[in-house]
Amino acid sequence: MSNTVVADKANDERIAKIQQRVVGMYHKHPWPGDRRSDEEMGWRLKCLGITPEDYVGKTVLELGCGTGDYALWYATHGAKHVTAVDLSDGSLARAREKAAEGNVKNITFIKHDVLTLDLPDNSFDYVYSVGVMHITGDTFGGFKNLVRMGKPGAPVIFSVPNKFTRGALRPKQWICHWLGGDDLEARARWAKRLFPISIWRLKKRFHGLNNEELVFDNFALPHETIHSVGELLRWFDKTGVKYMGGFPPFRVQDYFFAFAQPEYADFRKTFVGFPGLRLTSDVLTKVAKLFGAVTKPPFPRPGMFQRGICQIAWMPFALRFYCYTIAGRKG
């Protein structure tokens, strides 16, 4: 048996162990239990350079749908059909309940590993994965699989934790992991004892909708990788995806566009529990109104200096903006 085959087998076994623990956690603690997607989506998509024409009347694929909030948003905002994939029975059960409660028919939930999902190449008009691939054991592999299933010209949206902002939470995670060991329930209990203020702020951000779930999602994860903007831009280059935009923006001047948009008013509701961030954003809104939107989508690709400044600027708001989103268009 060659060294390559041995290495591949070892990697497959590593990923299988990661997935077993991660899926087990989300089966018991589906994340998020509920999310007010209308507060988020308008402003987020504007900043990414996405327009309704990109998804209205189109076939949409989500890898790692969790409890289905984003998939249901697209299904009820004009998508022709949404295919939403996850491996957690608990999360999918909640997603299907929500679809039934809302009588949403144009959505299909599939239980499958997002890394090995083998739907045909070039199948979907619009593909995305938000805050999931970093817990699979193969973030880049999952990204490549997502891109593969998008049609040429399809928007590709991808979200992962940022090295700068998630790194600020790392010491708290390490403490919980050290004290709780491999027992995820113990990690969550230590988080509640040691970091009640952080948990309270997260609860406020979700309007008290998700309590136990957010503790596990932030402090008890069995596995997680973190990624810089530059790293994902290199992934875009490797897979032939052309950059469109980022959220939060990756260039200073793009914030003038972001905060000039009326959709910020809805997103502002997600800053409950983060008064410093809300104040900063309100100031930026006034500045944007004064100077106007100096850029517009599709945004120029950010250089190293620009994206470095922006990622450092996110660090004081790490608890709220630990994940970032990047959008491109498949070539």
Image (cartoon, rainbow, N blue to C red):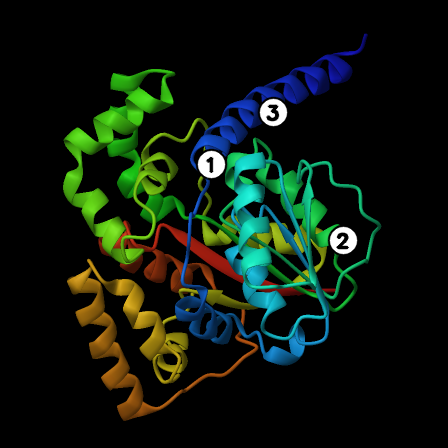
Q: Secondary structure at mark 2?
A: helix
Sequence-first disc among 3 and 2 = 3
Distance CA(mark 3)–CA(mark 1): 13 Å
Rendered residue at 24%/33% (across/down) = 172
Residue 248 makes an appearance in the image? yes
Sequence-first disc among 1 and 2 = 2
Residue matched to label 2: 149
Q: Position of residue 163 (x, y in %)?
A: 39, 44
- Above or below, 247 against 191 in this view is below
Numbered label attached to residue 225: 1
Q: Secondary structure at mark 1?
A: loop
Residue matched to label 3: 15
Q: Amino acid at mark 2?
A: Met
Rendered residue at 30%/54% (across/down) = 320
Rendered residue at 16%/63% (across/down) = 276
Sequence-first disc among 3 and 1 = 3
